[in-house]
Amino acid sequence: MGFRRHGPFQAGDQVQLTDPKNKRHTITLKADGVFHTHKGAIPHSDLIGQPEGSVVRSSGGTQYLAFRHLLQDYTLAMPRGAAVVYPKDASMIVGMADVFPGARVIEAGVGSGALTCFLLRAVGPEGHVTSYERRQDFADVARKNVETFYGGPVDDTWRLVVGDLNDSIDESDVDRVILDMLAPWECVDAAAKALTPGGVICCYVATTTQMSKTVEAIRDHGCFTEPHAWETLVRDWHVEGLAVRPDHRMIGHTGFLVSARRMADGVAPPPRRRRPKGTTEEL
């Protein structure tokens, strides 16, 4: 992965410029490039050789902060074929599904490649991600977005397959299966066959109906632990001296996550214990 994460800016680097109103622009530095806005122009040469965190001034006098963009910024700004997985959900998938360095991961429903970028970073150079996408146009957008962020092809750690997961999967003993699609319940059996015992399935869905069908499919399959379903809400805070309050706007519902672990072959999960109807007494 050739994307530089630190050091002085060089030609070829992607740089995020932020104006005083917090409007952000991403540019790729070129030796003879010029960034034009209605607030004036900034020659790329003013940035090349400068340390990250510098301030540059446009010809119109506006100051811009210059940083390499964070992955969360890039995924929100990337060109889209399909809707992207928000950083808050991608972070939860990486964390709660325990995607670790060296892991072998299957992703189905690559969309625009946002989650793929997070997964590739999490597995590192010793791991591998295989992404399945039914639509060629989405796959093309995802490949371009991933290679743009990482500064070129990542063939050593990423394989992109155009096709249906159920028909195209050719892997076994993988550590994690991440399903981001309209009907993940249709792929639960394929995920079970691919996962190593102890592996994690994690599904990202948008509606309560999808969540319910996914949970029941995992529960009924018989090879997984009791599925866990949740969502994550993010609320920023306004802090100015003693004026401390929640922001009026927040990133509320974006999707639900459902996860479970693969049981050993031939082992059934223990029966669920439920409270009797009409009582709070534990069984």
Image (cartoon, rainbow, N blue to C red):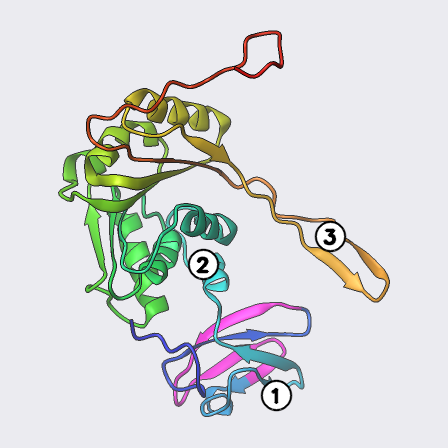
Q: Is residue 273 above or below residue 118?
A: above
Q: Quadrant of the N terminus?
A: bottom left
Q: Secondary structure at mark 3?
A: loop
Q: Could you tell me which residue is drawn at 15 percent across and 40 percent down?
A: 168
Between discs 2 and 1, the one toward the N terminus? 1
Badge 2, how many Cα within 10 Å: few under 14, some, many 20+? many
Q: Which residue is mark 1?
A: 59
Disc 2/disc 1 C-alpha distance (Å):
30 Å
- The picture quadrant where one finds residue 180 is top left
Q: Position of residue 106 (x, y in %)?
A: 26, 46
Q: Is residue 12 visible?
A: yes
- The picture quadrant where one finds residue 30 is bottom left
Between discs 2 and 3, the one toward the N terminus? 2
Badge 3, how many Cα within 10 Å: few under 14, some, many 20+? few
254 to the left or right of 217: right
Range of magenta residues: 22-41
Q: Position of residue 19 (x, y in %)?
A: 63, 74
Q: Which mark is residue 147?
A: none
Badge 1, how many Cα within 10 Å: few under 14, some, many 20+? some
Name the residue type under label 3. Answer: Asp
CB under 8 Å between discs 2 and 3:
no
Q: Secondary structure at mark 2?
A: helix
Residue lying farthest right?
242
Disc 2/disc 3 C-alpha distance (Å):
23 Å
Q: Secondary structure at mark 1?
A: loop
Q: Which residue is mark 2?
A: 75
Q: Could you tell me which residue is drawn at 40 percent across and 26 percent down?
A: 215
Q: Which mark is residue 247?
A: 3
